[in-house]
Image (cartoon, rainbow, N blue to C red):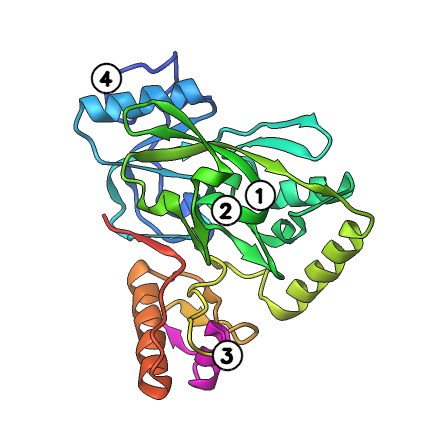
Amino acid sequence: MLSALLNIDCSLNGSRAQGEKLLSDLSTWRIGGPCKYFVQVSDHHQLASSLRHCNEQSMRYIVIGKGSNCLFDDLGFDGCVIRNSIVFLERNEPGLYRAGSGYPFNRLGLQTANEGFSGLEFAAAIPGTVGGATYMNAGANGQETADAVESVEIMTREGECVIFKRSELGFGYRWSSFQDMKELAAITAVTFTLKVSESEKKNQQEYMERRRCSQPLEETSAGSVFRNPEGTDLCAAQLIERAGLKGCRVGGAVISEKHANFFINRGGATSGDMLRLIDLAKEAVWRQFGVELHEEVLYIPP
């Protein structure tokens, strides 16, 4: 289903108009004002049509998935937000999975483990999409998305489809070469190669239980706010906790007392609250430990 661009006299593939869209509805942080235009796409053709229209109108746009690592501004976004709902899953041969970039990454992790394959067990607790996880090279528990990637399909800003083999791509800690790819509009599909395993379900259950005990999964958050810094044995959460910031609050934004790298919207938090809390944590850690923290979440200016 493709929703029409709001307030524009056009029709894309027979799409239908929707009312004003609040970005707080598109983000796991539940923060953000209205966007000027909103489109939801469910296949490559709809995405290409939306990109083409934005280009023709010289319109700013962003492509998002589930918004699990986005901090939208309270002023909203003065352009078009394209929500990627390209959701499909193909099992081409045993252990070879091709998933649409909008497919829930946690669902993929659960399904592949239940079907007896190892490589994406960690994904079961990551609330993003396949495309977002690949773009950020999401990982946990000693595993990374890149470890299982066979190939990645993208769409350029001009609407062209390109396929990259794993050997043509670069990955690092919470980094992929897609982040430096200026012509990239969106990842559209990812193919994963997984291995047969007899212990993947047990490992996944143990990992999920550790996550439930150590992270505030029931709270309104965007997951980890900061990347773990290099050059120190301490992770970002330990540095923030040792700086005495657990429970620290700015307006409706609070640093979790359960996991110090999770910043919570306890109700009514604004983008300004969250940005000030992020800056406070960075300044405190730098002042006390001389370590510079870098955000894992992405702030989207208006």
- The segment highlighted magenta reads 234-250
Q: Residues within 10 Å of mark 3 (few under 14, many from 20)?
A: few
State yes or no: discs 2 and 3 in contact (Cβ < 8 Å).
no
Where does label 1 land, which residue?
105
Instruction: Kindly indicate whether the residue at mark 2 contacts the one at mark 1 (C-beta within 8 angstroms).
Output: yes
Q: Could you say where residue 287 lies in the image, as x and y percent from the top left?
A: 31, 85
Q: Earlier in the sequence, mark 2 or mark 3?
A: 2
| Residue 209 higher or lower than 75, as above or below | below
Question: Are dots 4 and 2 in contact, CB under 8 Å?
Answer: no
Q: CA distance from mark 4 to mark 2?
A: 35 Å
In 3D space, how far apart are the residues under numbered discs 1 and 2 (Cα atoms)?
Answer: 7 Å
**Total marks placed:** 4
Q: Residues within 10 Å of mark 4 (few under 14, many from 20)?
A: few
- Under mark 4, the amino acid is Asp
- Find the distance from the CA under tag 4 to the CA under tag 3: 56 Å
| Callout 1 amino acid | Phe
Sequence-first disc among 4 and 3: 4
Q: Secondary structure at mark 3?
A: loop
Q: Position of residue 42 (x, y in %)?
A: 47, 25
Q: Secondary structure at mark 4?
A: loop
Q: Which residue is mark 2?
A: 133
Q: Specify whether residue 123 is painted magenta.
A: no
What residue is at 62 percent from the left and 70 percent from the top? 214
Secondary structure beneath label 1 = helix
Of callouts 4 and 2, which one flags the residue occurring earlier in the amino acid sequence?
A: 4
Q: Quote the CA–CA distance across marks 2 and 3.
A: 25 Å
Residue located beneath label 3 in the image: 233
Q: Residues within 10 Å of mark 1 (few under 14, many from 20)?
A: many
Q: In terms of depth relative to the viewer, which is nearer, 292 or 231?
A: 231
Query: Which residue occupies 40% across, 20% down?
Result: 46
Residue for badge 4:
9
Q: Is residue 50 left or right of 106 when viewed as pictured?
A: left
